[in-house]
Image: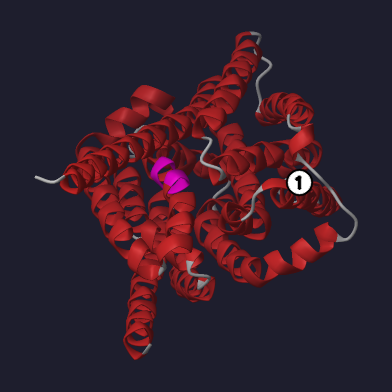
Amino acid sequence: MTQLDFRQNDMGGFTQGLKRIVAGVLLHRGILSLMDQAVVSATSFLTGIFVARSCSKEEMGLYWLAFGLVTVLTNVQIALISSPYTVYSPRLTGDAHRRYLGSATLHQAALSILLMAGLAASALVSSLTGKQSGLGPVFWVLVTTAGFLLFREHVRRVYFASLRVWAALIFDLGISIVQLSAVGILAYFHLLSTVTAYVAMGAVCGAAAVVWLWINRSEIAIRGSQPLADFWHNWSQGKWILASNIVFSLTTQLPPWFLAWLHGTAETGTFAAAMAFVCLSNPFVMGVGNYLSPKTSRAFAIGGTRQVAPMMAKATALIGGVMLLFFLVTLSFGDQFVVLMYGAKYAGNGTTVSVLALAFLVWASVLPVGLALTTWERSDVNFVANLVGLGLALVSGFWLVGAFGPVGGAWMYLLGHLGASVARSIGFGKVMRSASELAVST
């Protein structure tokens, strides 16, 4: 064997070792991502349990409606700021990256002000009309706290975009400990309600935002007209994500609002208990998604669709298999789990839980497809798919919710996700065929 052969063997061994190290790092980050989402979801879940056990079903319904509003606002933020940042920031380094982070943070502040103004208008209308009077205080407390809740999500997305998952975990763990302590104290002294729970959450997230801004002040640069230029650049990607997220949010949030309108907030509370239990799957699904989104963006930047497609197939198989197992467990023991966690007043919820778990299975199985379409800047396909789901939910929703209450709301939720998932899969297939034909022609 020649000296050159020895060098080639050494280089081959070095390359294989480097690949193993990289794979280990990526696996480590994936585990941290799951841990981080587990912390976030557990915090939300335990806060809901405090409210459900300390308050009435009507108060639980109000808490869940407020949670839904925050979710809608978060989806708007993700569309306009977080998703474009996740796609474009890996392509930047040095001062360019600092300026882009500065723009994103300024966009975040401006968007929070606009959204809180919209909440203030809704609170005023609710107060003047007197309809669903319990919602008035909920709107007003979100006016003062929603901006801080949204900034917490902004920080998480910034960390995930740079694959600093460990930093996101530390950040979320600190918030979780303080938030649950505050909510627990309120519950112990019989002071817990939807309003006081959100005051506590807003205060904790506000303090965390101040600390984060101070620590990262050297990483944030705002220069002249750069934020405006970055906004219009993001808009080219974000407009379709925004439209898609708004439609998706309507599909997921309409069932509890229909229940509040047609049956009252007590029935919304019943639905909320079932939904909160099914959301126990979120640490896994959203954890994979939080890790997969920036990883997909980086893979696409390096190798295009050919690099991303195998990753999507593996992620789909993983998520689908785990969620199928979760559905089967829920089908057998869902009602017992809900009673164990939220109390006997939520008994008889087994069918609602099972239908919602099936809806989560359908939604989660095509989550990697949606992330791939966003990475390929084809969020218009996601928008059309979500529009199909919303249409199907609306067509069936009034009758289902009016006739069957929380169970009907669950079926409405399932039909919406089913329609969107089928349409998204069809659209993804067309995009893949177009990409393959383009590759062959070139």
Q: Which residue reaches farthest bottom?
A: 441
In front of the other: 6 or 273: 6
Residue at screen point 58% across, 47% down: 264
Q: Is residue 289 magenta?
A: yes
- Residue 247 in the image: state x and y as whole percent: 56, 66
Q: Which residue reaches farthest right?
A: 224
Magenta residues (range): 287-291
Instruction: Kindly indicate the quadrant of the structure image that contains residue 232.
Output: bottom right
Is there any visible trace of residue 32 in the rendered image?
A: yes
Residue indicated by mark 1: 105
The three-letter code of the residue at mark 1 reads Thr
Is there any visible trace of residue 343 in the rendered image?
A: no
- Residue 348 in the image: state x and y as whole percent: 33, 37
Q: Which residue reaches farthest left?
A: 1
Residue at screen point 90% across, 56% down: 224
In front of the other: 405 or 376: 376
The image shows residue 441, relative to residue 371, as above or below, that is below
Q: Which residue reaches farthest front?
A: 2
Residue at screen point 56% across, 32% down: 168
- Residue 229 in the image: state x and y as whole percent: 80, 65
Count up the numbered dots.
1
Left or right: 14 in relation to 123: left
